[in-house]
Amino acid sequence: MNLTISFSKNWNNKLDNQFFTTIRLYNKEKFDYYLLNIDKIFDVKLNGHNYSQVKLLKVEKFKFSDIPNGLKIIDAGPNYKDIFSKFDVNDSSDIIILTFETINIK
């Protein structure tokens, strides 16, 4: 059984790309979990349904303010400020960037 990563929406249609990122709020347990699972296969759940299978390539920690705006747009679309504020992410937030490679779209 594969690991799972869940999305509530396919922001900027990123889940349809061969490679994509997701920006998530940092906590140590979550960061350590993903570090332990680099190169593992994850099932992507979109609104609770199987969407694709991906391989975790990279895990990085940043301050949200240190991420280039271009990456924020690619990750969440041109309204990224509104989207991230809904998840309580602001410029001083510590975040995790996960980079995935799509293996199979269902």
Image (tube, rainbow, N blue to C red):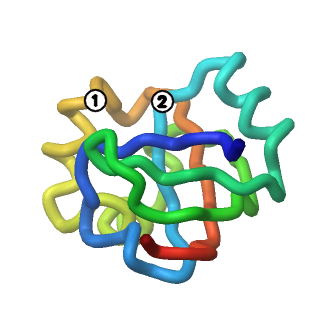
What residue is at 78 percent from the left and 27 percent from the top?
Answer: 32
The dot on residue 87 is 1
Position of the C terminus by quadrant: bottom left
Count of picture labels: 2
Task: Find residue 3 and report its image quarter.
Answer: top right
Find residue 13 and report its horizontal and vertical position in percent.
28, 71
Q: Nearer the viewer, residue 91 or 40?
A: 40
Badge 1: residue crowd in 10 Å (few <14, some 14–19, many ≥20): few
- Drawn side of residue 27 relative to residue 92, left or right: right
Find residue 10 and report its horizontal and vertical position in percent.
27, 60
Q: Amino acid at mark 1?
A: Phe
What distance separates the C-alpha of mark 2 from that of mark 1? Answer: 8 Å
The dot on residue 25 is 2
Q: Amino acid at mark 2?
A: Leu
The dot on residue 27 is none
Q: Are marks 2 and 1 in contact (CB under 8 Å)?
A: yes
| Of the image marks 2 and 1, the number of the one nearer the N terminus | 2
State the SS at label 1: loop
